[in-house]
Structure formats: structure tokens, C-alpha cells
Image (cartoon, rainbow, N blue to C red):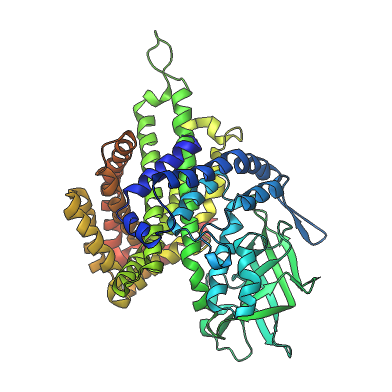
Amino acid sequence: MSYADAAGTIVAQILALPEFVRVQALFPDAGLDEAMLLDIIGAAGDLAEGVIEPFNAQADQVSCRLEQGRVRLAPGHHDAWQAFVAGGWTTIEGAPQWGGAGLPMLVHSACEELLNRASPAFGMLPTPMRCATKVIERYADPALCAEWAPRLVDGSWAATICISEPDAGSDVPRLRTAAVPHADGTWRITGEKIWISFGDHDLTPRIAHMVLARTPEGEHGAAGLSLFLVPSDVAGQRNAVIVRRIEEKLGLHGSPTCALGFEAATGHLIGTPGRGLAQLFTMIIGMRLSVGSQGAGLSGAAASLAWRYAAERRQGGRADAPPVTIDQHGDVQRMLLGLAARAEVTRGLVLTASAVADLQAHEDDDAARTEAGLVLAWLLPITKNFAAEAASLCANDAIQVLGGAGYTREWPAERYLRDARVLAIYEGTSGMQALDLALRRVLGDEGRAYRAFLAKARGDVDRLGNATLGALLDMLEQAASGLDKPTATVVAYPFLQLASLATTGWIAARLAALSGSPVHDHLAALGRHWLLLAQAQALAEAALTSHGQALVAAFDDVDRGYLG
């Protein structure tokens, strides 16, 4: 499937979304009809295919390097970035007051999928810029906001997110980076931060490092953390932010992942002291949806590659006849169908979550906005994790379809697998997403997010008359009713898998109901196939969830000495 074909399929999914009618109504000046969507998303595909994908192949080979304390990017990155900025792609979702186009998250996610299909490494830079803008415009003082927001929106300056430290990754409350007030009203930030994507580069003259740090009076734990904007330079002089190293990674070679040292660097407090982590969660919706778009992009790329290769590669068949293409073999057809169905429901999940995010942000009715927020709270951990794992699974299956060729660098399948693996780690590991879903969305807050999703999905069971979706939701309800806090940490992951299958079953049931055009028939076939797979896999995940503490009963009986 070419980028143009992928853009057309994305638009077909958007137009079929029940939520899209309301998104259109909330953005009356955007002109979001089919022609406009094809124009915007098609142009994103053109840029991805013509500029970013060729750069990515080279960047994967050459990677980034550290020279005299500064990051040097792969050849071609500057040209690709300039084309991206000149096309206005940093502005899609940006607020008009800062020069943004003010389009829905739904449109942004659609374009982002195609850009990530071409290069998820390239997409690692605009995401923190966009998400940092949301924090700055909501919490920063007006002068700081006026200085940074327009330049982040138009792509002339960049941003990073600096949370993790050597001794505190997912364990954020243990962060030790310190912030000390200065007489001029600024702060001095001292500490070490790791896993910082695009922690340094020369694509833009300035970078806003969004840093979580602890103030002198700050309490222990998360309540003592505040948020600071630490610019890469102050009054034309380089700030005391040092690149310690660039990590040597499995994939995403075009994206420099830096360890940064802050040596009494000048910073500006964002918002309220002690509320840094809570304020940073403003970015979480955008960051996790972007991981979803990365997963959708890589899943789609892997599925497309496998289908193209299988239609051309000839092996087997009758000995007295020419060999047949391998897509005529039943086992290959099974893999190809699984690839395409998983990729399409991943896309549908990301688009649906993005549309619900638009409703949560823009609904003018309090009750409707609250309901959308609850459904989004359910969808976010599922979207992030399912898309992340879908990318790895699809890349792995694409390699299997290609056979030995897939294991070589002659074909991009192995790169897809390398790039995909980290998606289930950053922005919250699979285990963290599982705990979020089980402890907060089901057991916490009276299960309001879970119940909001269930009501919405049950409504579609009645509307669509889809018995398989009903069965998936029944399994989800039974498993949720058996959750309790003592065993949640053990069964949270299989429960997340079951919840993901029920949720993507909901997406698939919507697709399966489409008809009336070739693209709708295509989507309906993949929806039906995913429902078949989801129901079978859900039985296993439901069984695992029901085992509770038995899943770790043997742990203390294993002698690590025998493991070597």
C-alpha cells in the first residue's frame, strides 16, 4: 500500500467514525469534509514518502554522534526538518493565537501516523515541542508563554521532556535533581537526566528543557516536585546544560537519546511549586497518543511490506507447474490477514482516541466533556500499549513472511522491529499502563472510566447487533468484577491485554459494519477477522487474569543459581 493509498484509507476511517460528526461541529471553520481531509493527509503522505523516508534509511545507517560536547545529526536531517517546518506541519494542532492552524487532534494523529510510518525517529522531535506548548500556555507566566509558545508552534525552537534520572526511571517520586531560587527570580537547576530525546541538536537555535526538579522546601515524593523551563541558552550564552553522552540504541538511530547534566543551569518555574508532576500530566494525552501514532505507522508499514513481498515472491506449488506466489499458501495468508487486521484496528484505535480527546478538550457542555474525559481515560493506556505492541508484533510477522530476506538489512522489516521495541517502554512501560488501567480506571474513582467505556461499547452492541463484541465485553466485565488491589499488580498485565482485545473488538465491530464502497468492504473484512482473533485470544487472557496470585506462586521456589 502506497502512502497515497494509506492516506485514503485513513480518511475513510475518519469519515466512518461516529464521533467525527461532533468533531466537525466543534471545528466549524476548519472545513473538515472529505476533500479537505484528503488534501491535508495526502500532503502529509507526500512529505513522508518523498522526503522523510529517504532520509530515514540513511539516518538508520549513519546515526548521530557527539563532537566537542554537541550532537551532530545524520546527513539530510536539516533538509528534512526544514521541509517539515516550511510545510507548516508543526502547526496543525497549535492554537491560532500562537500561529497554529487550530485543527483537531484527530487530523494531527492521522498525519502523524504517515510521518511515523516514514521515520519514527524523525517524529521524536515535534512531539515534545507540541506537548510542551500545552504546558507552557496553561501554566507559565504570560511573558514566558509569549516568548516560547509561538516559536514552538512554528518550529523555530524546540523542546525536550526531562524526567528520568539514573536512579529514578518509572519511580518518579524519587527524583533528586535540585532547584534553588536565585535573587533575580530565576532558579538554578542541578542534577542528571537520562533518556532525553533530541536533548541537543542544531536543527533549532534554542531548546526548552522541561525539567522536573525538587525545591529546597519540597516534600519527599511526588508532592515535592516542581516544573521548570531550562533554556539551552540565556541572553545568547550557552546555559549550563551538558551533554554527557548519546545512548547507543537498538533502533531509532536518527533520534539522539541524550544523558544531560544540569550544572546550576538557569531555569524558570512553571506554574505552582510542588505541582510539577500534576502539571506535566497535561502533556500525557499528546505524548501517549503520539506513541499510538508511532505504533500505527510502523504496523501499517510492516503489513504493507509483507503483503507486497508475498504477492511477488514465488515459492512452492505443483512440481509440474511454475512456482506460485507465496500469498497463495494458507499459512502465509493467515499471517498476512493477521498483520493487516492488527494494523487497521490499531489505526482505528488511535483515531478514535484522538477524536475523543478532541471532544474532551472542546465540548461546550459540561456533561459531554466529562463523559469524553472518562472514555479517554480508559482509552489512553490501552491505545499507548496496544499500538506499541502491535508495532513489534507486525514487524516480527513481516520478517517471518519475508523469511531470510526479512532478517537482512536489504529490507526494512528488521528496522521496523528495532524501532518498534522501545514503544512499549517509554512514556510508561506496559506494566505501568496495566497498573494505571487496573488500579485507577477500574478499582479507583468508583470505576467511572471503565463504566463510561462499557456503556459506550454496549451501546454499539445494540446498534450494530454484533454478538462477538458482546461476548468480549462480557469477558471484560467478568474479569473486572474479580479484580482486587492485593492481586492487581500480578494480574494487571493480562487484564490490560483482555481490556485491549475488548476495546479493539469494539473498533473492529464498527469497521465490520461498513459497506457500500471498495474501501469499506476492505475495512469490514479486516474488522471481521480481528473479531475472530480477538475472541480467541481474549479467552486465554481472561483465564490468566482469573488465576490471580497463582501466576507468581512458583517465584520463591526458583533458584536463580541454576539459571546460570
Q: Position of residue 426 (x, y in %)?
A: 53, 61
To which quarter of the image does residue 258 belong?
bottom right
Q: Residue furthest right?
A: 68
Furthest toward the top, the residue is 320
Q: Position of residue 491 (x, y in %)?
A: 34, 64
Horizontal and vertical percent for residue 170?
Answer: 52, 70
Q: Residue furthest front?
A: 29
Q: Please name the residue shown 44% across and 32% down the image.
A: 307
**As drawn, 395 above or below 131:** above
Is residue 117 visible in the rendered image? The answer is no
- x 40%, y 53%: residue: 351
Question: Which percent across, then down, holds residue 197?
Answer: 63, 60
Q: Who is closer to the viewer here, 238 or 34?
A: 34
Q: Residue 235 is drawn in which quadrant? A: bottom right
Total number of numbered labels?
Answer: 0
In this orientation, which residue lies closer to the viewer: 315 or 255? 255
Q: Is residue 58 above or below residue 158?
A: above
Position above or below: 282 against 103: below
